[in-house]
Image (cartoon, grey):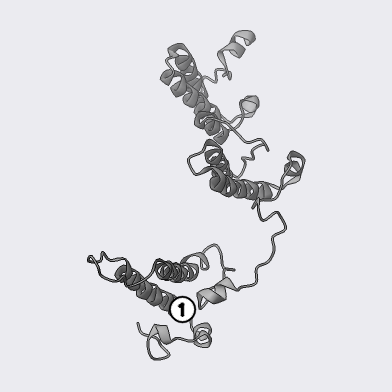
Amino acid sequence: MPNPNGGKWADLTSDEYYRMSDKNKARYHKGMHDLYARQIKLAVEPRKAGQAPPATDEQIRELRELSRFHSRQRLRITRYRHKNKPYLTDYYSFEEEDNRIVIKPQYDAVDKIPTTTKEMYGYYSRDEKQKYWARLHQQLNVEYGREHSKVNLANRIYNRMKDRPYYTPPFEGDELTEREFRDLYFRDVSEYYDFTDNEKRNFHRRLARRKGNDGDLEGSKWHFKMADRATNSVKRLPTYPTPEIEKETI
């Protein structure tokens, strides 16, 4: 779609830009991104021997910077601002974005993250703790790279908090295996005698399958027996959380 104010997108003025709808702003940035992308393609095409280069390296870098700028602004408008970041501002030109007023953060801009002690972490709300792990993941990703174990741990903890509202990790982190973490989906075994029959049945079936996978056939058989007892509401035979407790009780 052409410039609604007449002419080409390259003729659009700053005043016209800020009066346009978001839809037309996005079209402007797409049009300008495509324009610079074409110019870059021509500038980097293989040249015949002895032919003068159409653009210097510095000019190519400038074209790429402008192309990325327009792509960035379009994403702000079409994706981020209308979903989870409505506060993001779009800019008409790279110069306006580059000269924007930047609010100084309340933490060390070099470290990119507030210095959080174990004591401070203990006073954080759960939401603040989740934000802490998100910030830490970003910082460690820059420092170590995405494949580092520290980066993966911070990312895993953040996602676990996001997906499980009852899960809150300690300050030092959480090295739980996937199996151990999945146990957190259920009530703790210390509350076993407060379980409903359905919770007992699910608890024993889960452990029966686990014992079987680990090669502990006796343990698997015992937990299946307890699951059957929890299922049978007629006989009402007692159930126990572990074989050891059953032996102590009988």
**How many marks can you see?**
1
- Looking at the picture, tell me which residue is in the foreground, 20 or 14: 14
- Looking at the picture, tell me which residue is in the foreground, 113 or 54: 54
Residue 206 versus residue 217 in the image, above or below? below
Visible residue check, residue 56:
yes
Packing grade of label 1 (10 A; few <14, some 14-19, many >=20) is many
Residue 247 at x, y = what percent? 59, 8
Residue 240 at x, y = what percent? 58, 18
Q: Residue at x 65, y 48 (%)?
A: 132
Q: Secondary structure at mark 1?
A: helix
Residue 56 versus residue 153 in the image, above or below? below
Taking the view exactly as shown, the residue that stands out farthest to the bottom is: 6
**Left of 71 or right of it: where is 48?**
left
Q: Residue at x 59, y 48 (%)?
A: 139
Residue 199 versus residue 208 in the image, above or below? below
Q: Residue at x 55, y 42 (%)?
A: 160
**Left of 47 or right of it: where is 115?**
right
Q: Residue at x 57, y 49 (%)?
A: 138
Visible residue check, residue 233:
no
- Looking at the picture, tell me which residue is in the foreground, 111 or 216: 111
Taking the view exactly as shown, the residue that stands out farthest to the left is: 48
- Looking at the picture, tell me which residue is in the foreground, 38 or 117: 38
Q: Which residue is mark 1?
A: 25
Q: Quadrant of the C terminus?
A: top right
Query: Which amino acid, mark 1?
Result: Lys
Residue 183 versus residue 94 in the image, above or below? above
Instruction: Indicate the quadrant where residue 214 lies.
Output: top left
Residue 131 at x, y = what percent? 63, 50
